[in-house]
Image: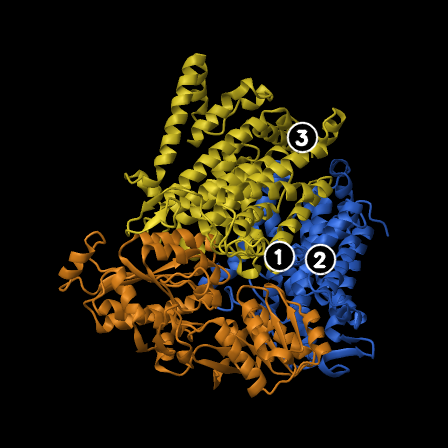
Chain colours: A blue, B yellow, C orange
Amino acid sequence: MIGALDSLVLVPMVNWDNLFSDIPGHTVDGLTRGAIYALVALGYTLVYGVMRLINFAHSEVFMVGTWAVLGIYTAIGAAEGDPLWFVIIATLLALIGAMLASAGTALVVERVAYKPLRKKNAPPLIFLITAIGCSLVLLEIFGQVLKVFFGEPFGRKPISIPSLVKTRQLIGPNGALIQTDVVTITNMQVIVFFGAVVMMFALDFFVNRSRLGRGVRAVAQDPETAALMGVNQDRIFMLVFILGGAMAGVAALLYTMQFDGTKFDVGFIIGVKAFTAAVLGGIGNLRGALLGGLLLGVVEVYASTLFDSSWADVTAFILLVLVLMVRPTGILGESLGKARA
Amino acid sequence: MSEKIDSETDTAGDITIEPERGARKQSIIPGVDIVKGLWSRQSKATRLVIRSVAIAAGIALLVYLPFLNILPFAQVRTDLSPEGSSWSAVLFQVVVYMIVAVGLNIVIGLAGLLDLGYIGFYAIGAYSVALFGSPSSPVTEKIANTFNLSTGWAVPFTACIPIAIAFALMFGVLLGAPTLRLRGDYLAIVTLGFGEIIRIVLRNLDITGGSAGIVEIPAPPGPEITNEYGSRVGLFNRLDHEYWYWLALVVLFLLILFARRLEYSRVGRAWLAIREDEDAAGLMGVDALKFKLWAFAIGAALGAMAGALFASHQTAITPNDFQLNLSFLFVAMVVIGGSGNMVGALLGAFMITYLPERFRDLQEWRPFAFGLALVLVMIFRPQGMVPSRRRAAEFADRKHEAEEAATDV
Amino acid sequence: MAALLVGASLAACGTTDDEGGSGGGGGGDDAACAGKIGAMGALSGPNASIVIPSVNGAKLALSQFLEENSDCDIELVPFDSEGDAAKATPLASQIADDADFLGVIGGAFSGETRATKGIFDEAGVTMISQSATATDLTTEDVKKVFHRVVGYDDIQGEAVATYISDTLGATKPFVVDNSEAYGEPLAATVISSLGDAVAGTDKTQVGQTEFSATISKIEAADADAVFYAGYIAEAAPLLKQIRDAGLEIPVVFPDGVYGADFPKAAGSAGEGAIITCPCVPIEDGEFSSDYEAEFGEKPGAYAAEGFDAMTVFLDAIKSGATDRAAVAEFVNSYDEPGLTKQIKFDDKGDISVDNVVIWSYKVEGDVLVPDQEISLS
């Protein structure tokens, strides 16, 4: 009977050696992974902070950005091995394109789907289902509709995007930028991590320091008073979707740079993870999104090395539940309105 | 049928708390006012007779549905096109999802808890029957080995159902107790996480059959019959889905009665109070956490019953049958029909399960059409197809507020 | 791959089931060569690209057959299960209830095959799967209607192990799977066949794009070869990240990655990757050019197996089989050379191990080039 119970106990194989042999390396991997979660999480957190609305279509806003990158690379004929000046131009163009495409998609979703609901003051659940509907429509536009009209690369197959930056030999071999005995950091990891952090601080600065940002905070804090003070609520909502979408566009570029590919349903898992990250850090809180994203990325990589990747999601969700039990509004709490420098 | 139950709901005023009368002035469907006028002029006895006859006729129609083959009504069948699917099997799946909708409606519609991981309880029900009922599951093999039982030993189907319910209640309380304190949107992500955790754990463990799942799941007991190919099979076999459909229908009816009882009981009123204003309910002495836990656990048990029926009918299940997107579909069923209203939830379950099967001809375009329909229905009928009277009143109120706010700005 | 469900049913037209005996007798004239075959699998949704080529292969077999036998009235009816077992059940019943259906090509994925083979069994509909490779399909919950024209996982797993240890000469191979019903058992067979040589193992998930943890384990184990049991969507980024990490060791994939989509998805990192498949090279043959002429693209995964499965049914109908029992009997005693291998089923419904051929392919540029046949010892 003891034997029977023994095998009923469900502990995955734990391999401490895997984790502790290379903690710095795993941490760098985790931070890189988390940086992209954090950028996508910003979209959830901005919209939630201002409108108390979970924009479940945000994962597809990200997905559209990855296709924009592919489109721009194809249009200007970028390929692996292009000269450095061309790579920089191509990347900048792709950045602008992805930000525009994602922000535009987010804006369309807001105008077409959410605005009519807001006019009717529909309950949050309705927004949720509408968001799921939008998500499906956007997915299918790339997975089905565009394929019927334009053929490949649209459709449901994974598509390769040329890797312009990663394989370049800047300093060390294999795109390594910093190589010490303790840890190897590739130039891609540096670009993804710092790209994400810089964008995040730029956004934080914008929300906390600019005139428009003050409007965003005002609406987040108290929509009615803000309206009385002459803040155009509708414009702030549009702004929030555009900002969140643009951040998803940046994330899309960084993602395609790192993984050299996309797929019509690439947004789903990243969307769920980013939403988890936003809640973990404190949804509605910009710095919470950064913290939540990075933490989630690191925890996932640790779990993948300690057990294996099939347990990473379970670990991440258990972490979320534990955090919420101690701090019911996430690590930093929800405070877009009160965000202080 | 749904129309009839609807009108019944609308007149069951003697047991509900009346919402503001003002909200009933405009009706969404033209002509309803006239019917309502005629209806209110009948005596109580006449109403009772009409209602009983209508319900009996409705039940008779539902029972007869698998054999419906008279044009033009037979157009509803899903097996008309050459690539169609078996009509009675689709009906069974529709009723199973209706049971899901009734259960989830308790959680979302009545108690106002946004549960995005309901698929987890559906999976728990399915796996309870599979793990204990199948002679080839690791659990039964382990038990048989431990206690020296004969090979092929398994828990009979009828005993698996209480096991499924017990597991669901247990997990409902286990997962709900620490998390139901969380506010709406936080609960959504946590439940979503639970749904995923349950699927992943079922997939990763050997004791649950791993990624290959479980085969040889037992069917409900029944007399042996001779099928059209001349072999002796059980009543609940793989070809005659109408028996399954009728069984599910009976379960659905019992659960509807149960849920209605619950809705108009003290528990139901407590849920309502919590949903409307948790703080106020707390001040009035309603133990919010306790009642939320009840809703969560009861909902879980209903989901598990649906899952058990599903698994038994499938005979083989894998963890991939319980993907996250099915959870979203379940929520969509409840919301699209009209959150808080059982008839609405039933209608939602029917439409979301049935329409994609009926319109198989659209093939690859179905997910796109589904997404588009979801958006359009929500934009043009945000209160759902058949909103509950109370929700409709709340909704009219919110809309009114929105209009006032708009003129203010 | 996991399991393809193709329901092909052939029905003798003019012969209803009730009067099967006499109808068969009278069917010598105009009704002899007719019926319907179902093909069940994921024809829409994310997994469709794995299944559609095999259904196209079956369509090609039918159209070529009808050109030569214009008096025949045979129809191939595709049924879209979306790869979802819950949706496959009503479809299987639909096929079973229509006496015109004499057989099914399918199930495409193991989940739906397990859930529907009982239905086909009760109705006596012969199944020939073009891609259901899960070993347990013919060993657990055995249904005699189930056949497949593809080698099952255990055979492929052993071949992979032979290839890794003998051809590659790897002494410290690393084995990764995708935690799915497809990859897990395949990896398990490879691991047990390789025995002590295995340097380490890891698991990934479907939908995963970042494999740094797996790669660090490969590096830590100092592996000299990697086998990944999974699908294209994860195999492509994994391979890229292995190459980006500077690991130039050989990487081997199973048939789940077979197809022209893989080089496209993997880009330049795909160069030199090895793919094993229980399928013979068809890239340059007549089948390939016919397929491309008909469908505008190179034949993808299991296209030739779909062709073979359909051919078995077509031969059955042509031989005069007009009801399900006759088709079943014909299929069970079938022994003809197919496009992919000698098609002869053993009493479990599997292709005899002697006839299964496993080939290795190498990615060169945008195409898979046949490398060598792996000997099955």
Q: In this view, does B334 lie above or below A151?
A: above
Q: Which chain contains the residue that carries disc 2?
A: A
Q: How crowded is mark 1: few (under 14 residues within 10 Å), some or many (20 or more)?
A: many
Q: Is residue C275 visible?
A: no
**Badge count:** 3
Q: Is residue B224 left or right of residue A339?
A: left
Q: In this view, does B188 lie to the left or right of B329?
A: right
Looking at the picture, tell me which residue is in the foreground, A72 or C243: C243
Query: Which of the image's four quarters has the C terminus of chain B?
Result: top right
Numbered badge on residue B276: 3
Q: Is residue B395 above or below residue B358?
A: above
- Amino acid carrying label 2: it is Thr
Q: Is residue C374 above or below residue B84?
A: below
Q: Is mark 1 on a helix, strand or loop?
A: helix
Q: Distance between the residues labelled 2 and 1?
A: 11 Å
Q: Residue A293 placed where, x, y %? A: 74, 58
Residue carrying label 1: B200
Q: Are marks 3 and 1 on the same chain?
A: yes
Residue extending farthest to the right is A341
Q: Can residue C340 be seen in this view?
A: yes
Q: In this view, does C172 lie above or below A311?
A: below
Q: Residue B243 placed where, x, y %? A: 38, 41
Numbered badge on residue A270: none
Q: Which chain contains the residue that carries disc 1?
A: B
Q: Residues within 10 Å of mark 3 (few under 14, many from 20)?
A: some
Query: Which of the image's four quarters has the N terminus of chain B?
Result: top left
Q: Residues within 10 Å of mark 2 (few under 14, many from 20)?
A: many
Residue at x-position 26% and y-position 57%: C100
Residue carrying label 2: A315
Q: Is residue C89 left or right of residue B256?
A: left
